Image (cartoon, grey):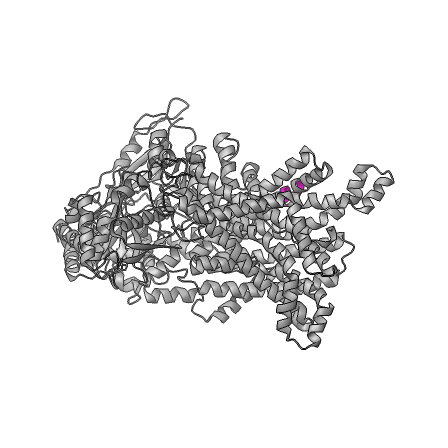
Amino acid sequence: MKTITRSLAAGIVGVALASTPALATHKTHPVTGEVLSDNQTYTYVSIDESSSLDPGLIEDVSGAAVARDLFEGLLTQNADGTLAPGVATRYTTNADKTVYTFHLRRNARWSNGDPVTAHDFEFAWKRAVSPELASPYSWYMEIMSIKNGAAVINGEKDKDELGAKALDDYTFQVTLEASLPYFPSMVVHTTTMPVPTKIVNAFGDEWTKPGNMVSNGAYVLSEHVLNERQSRVRNDLYWNNDATILDKVTTVIIQDENAAFNRYIAGEVDQTAPPSGQFNALKKSMPNDVHTNPRLCTYYYNFNMDAAPFDDKRVRQALSYTIPRDIIIDNILQGGQIPAYTFTPGATANFTVPEVAFGMMTQAERDAAAVKLLAEAGYSKSNPLKATILYNTSEGHKNIAIATSQMWKQKLGVEITLENQEWKTFLATKGAGDFEIARAGWCGDYNEASTFLDLVNSESGYNDSNYNNPVVDKLLAEAKTMSDPNGNYTQIEKIIADDMPIAPIYHYTGNMLLKPYVKGYPFNNVEGNWYSRNMYITAH
Amino acid sequence: MLVDNKKVQELADNMAAEELTGRSLLQDARHRFFKNKMAVVSLMILVSIIIFAFVGPYFAKWSYEEIDWATMGNVAEMGRPSIESGHFFGTDDLGRDLYSRVIQGTQISLTVGFVGSLIAVFVGTLYGATAGYLGGTVDNIMMRTVDILMAIPYMFFLILLLVMFGRSISLIFVGIGLISWLDMSRIVRGQTLSLKNKEFIEAAVASGVAPFNIIRRHIVPNVMGIVVVYATLLVPGMIMTESFISFLGLGVQEPQTSWGALISSGAGRLQYGTYWQLFFPLFFFIATLLSFFFIGDGLRDALDPKDR
Amino acid sequence: MLNFIIRRLGLAIPSLLILIIISFVLMHSAPGGPFTSEKPLPPIVLANIEAKYGLDKPLPIQIANYVWGIVTDFDFGPSFRYKDRTVNDIIEVGFPVTIKYGFWSFLFAVTVGVFLGVVAALRHNTWADYTAVGIAIGGSVLPNFVMAPLLVLLFTVKLGWLPGGGWEGGQIQFLILPVIALSTSYLAGIARITRSSMLEVLHSNFIRTAKAKGLPSSYIIWRHALKPAMLPMLSYLGPAFVGMVTGSMIIDQYFSTGGIGLHFVNGALNRDYSTIMGITILVGTLTIVFNMLVDIMYAWIDPKIRY
């Protein structure tokens, strides 16, 4: 068996070496030499309380951000999103890329002093797929193609049969069902982070409470008041603690975006989202605070292909063509989002956006084509197409739905009813297939096109349109093991652009207001994975 | 705004104590109501707002759902109130005409207020009159039930109801109406108890009129005065409740709107320089609430036999 | 009086039972459950987790178990959304917050409201009266979700005096804006009622007699007028209390105070059955107890009422 060894860039270590004792009363940054503030506290806004801080259970973006501070997985990311060593210093793989072996560092410790071992990873991974935990993100382990992963999740096999094993205290081996070249990029995700075996067994569900929780990341949880705030402070036992600059990081929960903005202006928080519709104005009034960067996310509408009128390709095409993508981006979102004609964002690693036919047309051409298509499908002024857009309650979704429906009305004479529902109701309605057009958004879980295109697989649990095209399924299956799957991805995107099971609207950008004295935020990370340990506050 | 039950109760007591003299009482009350300046001015304001809600759309250049694409995205500058652009009240955040939307909101909010009160009045009057007229054990059970229901925090229920069954305007009517009939039923019952022993009721009983017909034909018309006063005072409360629900994001479906929805989005975005988004809906909201408030007071004073 | 209290308590129990049953049935008939997620859980996993929380049993048994848990252990069950918290945890943390700003709002509304009302009545038809009436009318029609952003704009953004939200243990600077925003409309209501009943009392015969006897007017007000004038206000306090508890949903949402108001709204949205039940029962009990206290005070102050 030929083994490929790959050494990983170690940007953080460089920072650690350069750290020198500061001469003046004010410390300076070891690399850039900027004068640091004495108060290294970073406070940022989150819209919602996360349902859990347990890496195995986390399902939301803001919870994942907290977990990246508290826990360290096998690998982590540099500021630009490239892989960096985490608890694993290196990994090896066999020739057909079905067995990955991770070699763990010996100086990694839990915050109670226990060493972080391969057994903690084995425990965490088996726990994440176990039906007892019933993690809403167990499916992630399934798409990682870990051997027996799907079977364990569905309760067909015992969790001990999962292809994840600690060979010894510092060697962790994963066996896959099939070759997966991008597997290492998947172990950055929170679901794959270790959990402290002893603590989890001792406290059960309550192990994530402050006081109980023991973690291995750069920070430890110090305070967690539901729906108000959650703080984490420097972990002195973290192996690279010397390089950490921020002493305390606080998440405050503010549900009202305008209230959050007020508190940002008043200097109570260091980061928040720009309130909807204000991005252009803010770019003028506070240019140093406004940031935007591409993200691996797509906003789209699902058409319910099971029932008329959306079982007709021409209807789907007509509606997709006339979505006012540019208006939505320029006037509603205003954050430099990218109009989407393909499902996969161009920012995805190794992915070239294919030239799909309707993406090449001008809006006028698209409108003309749409009018024709809808007429061919048998709809006219006297027999107008009627449909309902279903979206979950949110200012942004509402505005996009309003703009889209008004444009459809003007251009095509389509009569649209808007229906917003609370998240849970929305999920239930959508899950029951009880919708015509439903709003959706998808963010890549790892940086590879399959994290998007898997959704149009007829087997996917997220395939809400109920799109079923054997050709696409076959192309997807092939792509999994190809060293360069881009050809397949291009073909799939072209098929989707014609079949139009979904209408892509825009690719997200990460927009935020960040105080100019907060440095080190990884704006170039398209997955939006930021680590507090790389950030710092300059004197201000 | 909460209804000042004590005052209504006092009025009820005074009315019950008085012999009913039919038409002259009403004429007298009308005369006294129109002598109350605040009440008359309020009535005029209220009537103009109602007329505005119906006639206003004929002057609108934009419909309440239409987007002014040119304005969208730069509302703080382009969306100001102006005669030339046809946006008399400016535009909302998406470039929709606020004039038309305020009219739409007025229609919805007034409807919620009126229909909600009607439901409360209908259920409360029937329930109270029935309990009071039948008396005895039935009365006891019915009124204990009211006591029990009184103790329930209704807003919590209403929220559960809206979250669980989705937002619909009819659910809001029913939900809000059903919250408010309890006090009504108590007042009506008290009135009925005192009416029951009056001669004309006894005469009706003696001539064999069925209990339900007595309630319908003799009791209900005689408690109408107090009911109307109470209903007038209820309407602003209903409108307030609807606005609260709208703030929580559980109000009517877009593109429809209500005062509550308009005000809460306008209030939140005041710091962005779009003051008109708060000013116009709030103006109509406050004018209406105050009008109802003074009209209710005026009616109460006018009907109170003690003050004559 | 004892008899009266016992009878009121007797009513409280069926009230609470109805409350529990209706909310239980409402919740469970809603679309989606606590474990509805974007990607449906495999059936076996769902069955597993529903069994863990007892959701697989028939509804009446679930209700019975739930009530039994409360009665025997004062246990409101685990939160379905926050796996590491029980509902008792959530209430233990959130309730003191609500009580704290609620209490101060109540106190503020009553003291300032009564003060304004009395001043207005004593200085009837002077500028003081008009100011007080103006405040009362303005305050009663401005919803607290308008008050909150206005206050923050003024005191946080413009003047920089007070934080625009947060709680941090409830230090005074975090308390002021929520208290004002929550109490304004009730303050206005109390002022209005106090004013009108005070006017009525001042024009009544016994006050005239007292004046005729040549008693000093401050003595008359404190000794004779205030107590009867407070009666109508007392009956307003019950609904005002409920209104403030309800208003906490807005306060928690706008000021991120972390009280039970937001927990309730979020609980409903997340189908966190046990949290919704816990808070509904808590608020229901409080409402009942509070109304009872008001009635008792009423009976105590008003010699005419005999229960």
Residue most extreme to the bottom? B208
Q: Position of residue A531 (x, y in %)?
A: 33, 40
Instruction: Classify B273 as above or below B111.
Output: above
User: Would you say residue C215 is visible in this rendering?
Assistant: yes
Q: Position of residue B211 (x, y in %)?
A: 64, 74
By secondary structure, the bulk of the magenta-drawn segment is best described as helix
Task: Determine whether, in the image, residue C305 is placed left or right of residue B80.
Answer: right
Task: Say how many tags the image has.
Answer: 0
Asked which quadrant contains residue C291, the reply is bottom right
Asked which quadrant contains residue B210, the reply is bottom right
Residue at the (73%, 67%) spot, across then down = B198
Residue most extreme to the right? C213
Task: Determine whether, in the image, residue A498 is placed left or right of residue A150.
Answer: left
Asked which quadrant contains residue A492, the reply is bottom left
Task: Determine whether, in the image, residue B121 is placed left or right of residue A228.
Answer: right
Nearer to us in this view, A392 or C64: A392
Provide the residue span drawn in magenta.
C106-111
Residue at the (64%, 47%) spot, across then down = B34
Task: Determine whether, in the image, residue C135 is placed left or right of residue C159.
Answer: right
Instruction: Classify B68 as above or below C268.
Output: above
User: Would you say residue A211 is visible in this rendering?
Assistant: no
Residue at the (40%, 24%) spot, across then down = A26
Nearer to us in this view, C157 or C101: C157
Instruction: Classify C159 as above or below C110.
Output: above
Q: Position of residue A165 (x, y in %)?
A: 27, 56
Q: Is residue C173 magenta?
A: no
Nearer to us in this view, C190 or B99: B99
Q: Position of residue C145 (x, y in %)?
A: 50, 44
